[in-house]
Image (tube, rainbow, N blue to C red):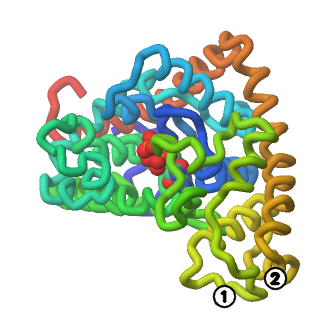
Amino acid sequence: MNEAVQTSSEFAPRVFSGIQPSGGLTLGNYLGAMKRFVDTQNTGVQSIYCMVDQHAITVWQDPDKLRRATYELCAGYIASGLDPEKSILFNQSQVPEHAQLGWVFNCVARMGWMQRMTQWKDKAGKNQQNASLGLFAYPALMAADILVYHATHVPVGEDQKQHVELTRDIAAKFNHDYGVDFFPIAEPVIEGAATRVMSLRDGTKKMSKSDPSDASRINMTDDADTIAKKIRKAKTDPDALPSEAKGLEDRPEARNLVNIYAALAETSVDAVLAEVGGKQFSEFKPILSELAVSKLAPISTEMARLMEDTTEIDKILARGAEQARAIAQPILKETYKIVGMVGA
Ligand code: AQP
């Protein structure tokens, strides 16, 4: 057995998460994922962050747009505060061990598990026969993304909870089927005021980069005027803001805007309402816009600077892939040995 591979249930803490380069980054990706990745990195725990381009192609992507979105996502990570000296930052397809372990997990996961996935039902919709096989199998690849590093903690938004639970099921079934204690049972880490940022047009729908309506989301690359306009036009109700969180129940749009404010200001919903309770949306929206612009403008300016010359990003990704492979290769090799593959 390779000395570097940990096989006990006492796994050292290690964080993994990823974002798809399937379009421009949204405020949902920033608050639900990216900002929290930076906070985690700064606690000193070993952190591994990825651009999951192989997930993106489960739905057809224009190749030039995919390349650009991958660079832009990497620029977004760095501009948000991810430091390639502190975290491992890389692109999934540059580390083939993800797809290799993904195949093993395709043989562990059950069809019924995949059929229950909410994201499969949402994305394939009524057109399941025409959806790609990759879209169906995506959660097994996501399990491989996490477990090829023996990651123990996965910071994600609320929408990804089910996928991390499936990762736990796959790890447990693999360990059981082969009589080993090889893969950790990873924990989803879903915390903060914005674990589920909702559409600005419909407070019951997730803010998403693939929503056909650009007005439904704030993009990380939107300029100040666009952000202000989108917030001004955001759907609300006619009542004033309440003074306590309980008053946001059954008011999804109001709750969403207050959650966004709290997450951007790094405070609690109660603290926000203590300040703005009683105000009309006509007063609250400009305050929210100002805060959003002050937080996002420096990030989008830095993203634009990084995008001017992508050779720097290429270097960061090449080094990140090398660091990632140094961890993933022995874990894959050991997996192959466990399942009985000759030559491993
Ligand atoms: N609205 C959101 N609120 C909180 N967190 C969110 N995340 C995404 N949207 C929100 C979190 O961002 C991370 C990366 O997600 P992803 O881009 O890989 O996939 P996704 O969840 O499917 O995001 P989108 O924007 O809806 O992408 P498309 O439209 O391509 O499917 C995850 O941690 C996710 O929870």
Q: Quadrant of the C terminus?
A: top left
Residue at screen point 22% across, 54% down: 174
Frontmost residue, 315 versus 1: 315
Can you say whether 256 is above or below 292 in the image?
Answer: below
Give the amino acid at mark 2: Gly
Does 251 sit above or below residue 81? below
Location of the N terminus (image quadrant): top left
Residue 176, image x and y in percent? 20, 61
Q: Which residue does the image show at 79% across and 21% down from the upper left?
A: 305
Q: In the rendered structure, are the residues bearing label 2 and label 1 in contact, judged by CB atoms less than 8 Å apart?
A: yes
Instruction: Provide the residue designation for mark 1.
Output: 247
Amino acid type of the residue tagged 1 in the rendering = Gly
Sequence order check: which comes first, mark 2 or mark 1?
1
Is the shortest distance between ligand 1 and the CB of mark 1 under 8 Å? no
Quarter residue 130 falls in: top left
User: Which residue carries the number 2 mark?
Assistant: 277
